[in-house]
Image (tube, rainbow, N blue to C red):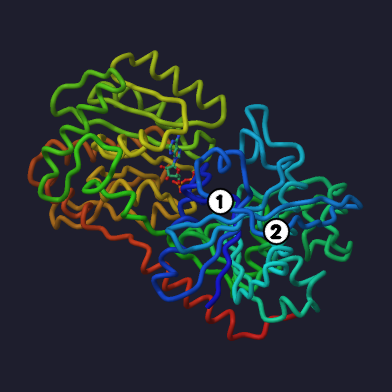
Amino acid sequence: MDILMVASEMVPFAKTGGLADVVGQLPKELENLGHHLGIVLPYYRMVKEGGFETEHVNPEFVTTLSDKAVQGEILRASLAEHITVWLIKNDHYYDRDGLYGSEKGDYEDNAERFTFFCRATLELIKTMGLKPDIIHCHDWQAGLIPVYLKTLLKRDPSFATVRTVFTIHNLAYQGVFPKADMPLTGLPWEAFTPEGIEFYGKLNLLKGGIVYADAVTTVSRTYSQEIQTKEFGCGLEGVVQSRKEDLYGILNGADYTEWDPEKDRFIRKNYGKTTYLSGKKDCKRSLLEEFGLELEEDAPLFGLVSRLAHQKGIDLVAEAADEISRCGGLVILGKGDEKYERLALELRDKYHGKVGVRVAFDEPLAHEITAGSDFFLIPSRYEPCGLNAIYSLKYGTIPIVRATGGLDDIIIPFDPESGSGNGFKFHNLSKEAILSAIREATRVYEEKDPQKRLLQSAMKCDYSWEKPAREYEKLYLKTLSEDRRL
Ligand code: ADP
């Protein structure tokens, strides 16, 4: 199959979260299965300055937004040497410090920036003569593509056999814009209805993807069920339910060429299942030094790497910090909402020497924390997948998670008797619940035998991309076999 992925971020070019990991990794695995892949991405400043090899491939193209003709260019780069990455260039839209916004908030012209991205992708397919069987669109930034294909372009022969798959990486980020932005899209007003992309009088790009794609996926089985409920549906539960026959939950995988303590280029000492004890000790020591923390030799160290958003539950960690700092230490790496950045820094000041905080987006440090901590905290209110749980297992860094979304699928509670399970989880969003999981975890940590069994069980968990890639392959084939043109 010929598969074109369209997304607003991808490692190693541009990343703010898990979406980038998925878009940088899944294509490689699909190529291993014998498919032909391409990826479309905006040419951000971050990409421009990232030192990637790029070439101009064709003359400028023009697309229309409202009545305005907007020019763009196409550049080409590559991922893993032979996967083409098409970069959509328009400096006015993408040559900025952030991907979606600045400290002041989201960029005000995001509707225009990503409408342009979707239209430019369709121009790219035509001008470069691409013949994708599947266009796999990710999140709201690519949500208009399925809409165009089922409306404006439904009789366009260039797209007659194309099918779309739309993946929701986080239902809470929907790309909602005022009705006044509708003309930008060039879509007919008939699409601006509750059955289309209208959402309480506004334009909702994520909804567009969900309604018009041939198949919809999200990044874990549990999250695919949760988003059909009022509690997790962010107002779109009815829309998601209406697609439930075509909705699939496919858990993300891990790129073990990047996230493996035996090969990790960012950590103090590489280690594997048999060299765990000495390797981890060195990584932990180096991490403690980096944050200026002092801990007893065998006191547990808790790590947290996260976007600092309400979703991620750092306030719950703050409530547990008293007890954590009495029994061990805590390191936090995060960036995001000012309110939570401030909360993290307050913890650092309050528990001086026991809590270390870095407010930054720092890839190497994320690896060091994953390797050097004993436990990894993920107390999310909701979590579509929870890649950090998958990564930390491989490092023998035991996840303590809230049982929600992908985290609930990944973590099986440890049973010291049988030695089965790979971590600890709690259900309620309360101080008592997180503390009870932390206490259970530290009890196991104190006893040599159960601790060893837990580590063995965690480190042998295999979440490589092969299985999910095969599930996507099956879904693409199914979608292609069905007649879905309107
Ligand atoms: P989300 O996509 O909601 O942010 P995930 O857990 O699925 O959550 O993926 C987050 C990814 O981003 C992981 O690879 C994690 O290590 C990385 N990450 C998050 N915050 C930071 C940070 N401050 N510095 C470095 N990496 C980070």
247 shown above or below 66: below
Question: Is label 2 within 8 A of ligand 1 (CB to nearest ligand atom)?
Answer: no
Calculate the distance from the C-alpha at mark 2 to the C-alpha at mark 1.
Answer: 34 Å
Q: Nearer the viewer, residue 375 or 61?
A: 61
Provide the residue designation for mark 2. 207
Position in image of residue 57 (x %, y %) = 64, 58
Looking at the image, which residue is at 20% across and 21% down?
Answer: 295
Q: Amino acid at mark 1?
A: Thr
Viewer can see residue 200: yes
- State which mark lies toward you, 2 or 1: 1
The quadrant of the rendered image in which ligand 1 is seen is top left
365 shown above or below 413: above
SS at mark 1? loop
Q: Amino acid at mark 2?
A: Lys
Q: Residue furthest right?
A: 67
Q: Is residue 234 left or right of residue 354?
A: right
SS at mark 2? helix
Mark closer to the chain start, 2 or 1? 1
Looking at the image, which residue is at 19% across and 55% down?
Answer: 457
Q: Nearer the viewer, residue 265 or 298?
A: 265
Residue 71 has which mark? Answer: none
Q: Is residue 386 left or right of residue 208?
A: left
Looking at the image, which residue is at 24% across and 48% down?
Answer: 263
Position in image of residue 337 (x %, y %) = 56, 30
Q: Is residue 226 left or right of residue 372?
A: right
Looking at the image, which residue is at 63% across and 27% down?
Answer: 103
Viewer can see residue 230: no
Provide the residue designation for mark 1. 54
Neighbours of disc 2 within 10 Å: few (<14), some (14-19), many (20+): many
